[in-house]
Image (spheres, helix red, strand yellow):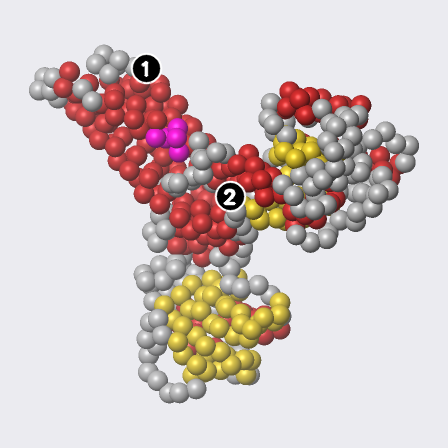
């Protein structure tokens, strides 16, 4: 794969001041010389230095754009190979023309994630850092960006390598007992090995436990505002967003379809979904909207069950409560600016959590509601260490923990060889996270999710 030279647009097509075309491979410098005419005469290109000049068609010499170029010789480049970056004007036409000239000069179009894949193969990044690059690019919330950057700096890699190193030390001591059984005391080998394996397993389980929060930081969360008509669902959506997004009227059934908006709460990106009011209806359009409600409920990480505090619970309220009783629900009593006659005890009993009182009309209680939403989504304690964000990482950690659990069930003194095999399996599972041992098929799946320019 690294015998040829690849090229792609590293930025997006569309209006913009600048675009970047990236070239990587053994012919990168020769391609640069074929398409670039410096404004000032010079000898050979110096690495990591910007040059100003004209970009031309290599076949006709036709002027295409005024550009800046930079040659970064390997291994001190993103991919570890010779890399050229061309900074041209943005838009649609110019970047396409520049890329076409580069391809005419001998490069081939890069595949998805091929630049980062080459960086991984050439040892510039481990697999967790490569995956973190995609997460940094797609991060929309502050928390997701922070977690991705920590992985990009190698924090997850460091943790995994530390756990692997400790297991390898245990394995070496156990194998020594097999190879030098006459010279090594059984008790000497067993002492401390089981305890260390147990500690490593606990740390692996703890790391796997960060996946839920890590996934939320990476993907964001989904909240559904649920309730019967006219309890203030659309008003609450507008209040959370801080702007008027949903139409609010006293007419029941105003919201027929669902409205979905992005809301960032304490750095966590949340999709807030305002739904049609639940009630019996013969209106086909309204009924279709209600069916959408239950589909969205199934996808939600949290349901805000909204009721009108100025009225007693209705049969519709109770039917909704029964239907979502097994889900993660936060009961919210709206219209706290009016006398409350609603049976709060029934809500608390149904959901095992005290209801919050708010006024969506006047914005009262919204700060407490926001804090509670955040706590229910991410947990009482935020992750203070590195977090796992990929299902692939979680699967590998679970395999490692299971293998170590089996190892601990073995008698280290009488079943040393079997215990060693379990520890080896755990080491291999951890190695798959960093890419120390990973199949080409897995790499194909991972890098297929990247954009072409990465």
Answer left or right for 423 relative to 3.
left
Q: How many marks?
A: 2
Indicate whether 348 appears above or below 219.
Answer: above
Q: Residue reaching furthest right?
A: 282
Indicate whether 441 appears above or below 348.
Answer: below
- Residue 416 point in image, percent of width and height: 24, 17
- Magenta stretch encompasses residue 206: yes
Residue 438 seen from this side: no
Which of the 4 image quadrants contains residue 13? bottom right
Helix, strand or loop at label 1? It is helix
Indicate whether 326 appears above or below 216.
Answer: above
- Write the residue at 80% across / 43% down: 255
Residue ID for mark 2: 217
- Write the residue at 37% across / 30% down: 204
Residue range of the region highlighted in magenta in the rendering: 203-207
Answer left or right for 234 relative to 107.
right
- Residue 48 point in image, percent of width and height: 35, 71
Mark 1 residue crowding within 10 angstroms, few (<14) / some (14–19) / many (20+):
few
Viewer-proximal residue among 251 and 69: 251
Quarter of the image with the N terminus is: bottom left
Residue ID for mark 1: 409
Helix, strand or loop at label 2? It is helix
- Residue 144 point in image, percent of width and height: 49, 47
- Write the residue at 19% across / 26% down: 173
Q: Which mark is residue 376?
A: none
Viewer-proximal residue among 374 and 416: 374
Q: Nearer the viewer, mark 1 or mark 2?
A: 2
Q: Main secondary structure of the magenta part?
A: helix
């Amino acid at each position: 794969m690294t015998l040829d030279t690849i090229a792609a647009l590293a930025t997006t097509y569309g209006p913009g001041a600048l675009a970047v075309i990236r070239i990587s491979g053994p012919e990168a410098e020769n391609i640069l010389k074929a398409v670039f005419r410096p404004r000032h005469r010079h000898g050979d290109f110096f690495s990591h230095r910007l040059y100003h000049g004209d970009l031309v068609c290599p076949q006709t010499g036709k002027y295409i754009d005024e550009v800046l170029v930079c040659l970064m010789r390997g291994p001190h480049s993103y991919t570890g190979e010779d890399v050229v970056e061309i900074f041209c004007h943005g838009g649609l036409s110019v970047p396409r023309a520049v890329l076409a000239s580069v391809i005419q000069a001998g490069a081939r179009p890069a595949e998805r994630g091929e630049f980062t894949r080459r960086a991984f193969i050439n040892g510039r990044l481990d697999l967790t850092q490569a995956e973190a690059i995609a997460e940094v690019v797609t991060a929309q919330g502050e928390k997701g960006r922070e977690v991705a950057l920590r992985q990009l700096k190698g924090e997850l890699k460091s943790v995994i390598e530390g756990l692997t190193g400790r297991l390898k030390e245990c394995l070496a001591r156990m194998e020594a007992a097999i190879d030098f059984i006459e010279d090594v005391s059984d008790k000497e080998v067993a002492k401390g090995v089981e305890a260390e394996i147990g500690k490593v397993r606990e740390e692996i389980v703890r790391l796997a436990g960060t996946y839920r929060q890590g996934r939320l930081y990476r993907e964001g969360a989904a909240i559904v505002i649920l309730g019967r008509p006219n309890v203030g669902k659309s008003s609450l959506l507008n209040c959370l967003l801080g702007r008027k997004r949903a139409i609010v009227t006293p007419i029941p059934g105003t919201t027929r379809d669902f409205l979905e908006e992005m809301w960032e709460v304490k750095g966590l990106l949340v999709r807030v979904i305002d739904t049609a009011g639940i009630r019996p209806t013969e209106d086909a359009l309204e009924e279709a909207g209600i069916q959408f409600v239950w589909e969205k409920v199934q996808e939600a990480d949290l349901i805000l069950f909204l009721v009108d505090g100025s009225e007693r619970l209705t049969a519709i309220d109770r039917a909704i409560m029964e239907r979502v009783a097994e889900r993660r629900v936060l009961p919210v009593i709206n219209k706290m600016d009016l006398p409350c006659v609603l049976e709060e005890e029934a809500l608390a009993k149904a959901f095992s959590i005290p209801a919050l009182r708010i006024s969506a009309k006047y914005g009262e209680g919204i700060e407490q509601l926001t804090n509670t939403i955040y706590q229910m989504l991410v947990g009482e304690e935020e992750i203070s260490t590195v977090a796992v964000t990929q299902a692939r990482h979680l699967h590998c950690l679970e395999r490692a923990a299971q293998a170590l659990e089996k190892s601990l069930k073995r008698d280290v003194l009488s079943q040393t060889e079997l215990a060693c095999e379990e520890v080896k399996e755990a080491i291999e599972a951890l190695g798959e996270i960093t890419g120390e041992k990973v199949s080409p098929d897995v790499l194909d799946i991972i890098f297929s999710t990247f954009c072409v320019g990465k």
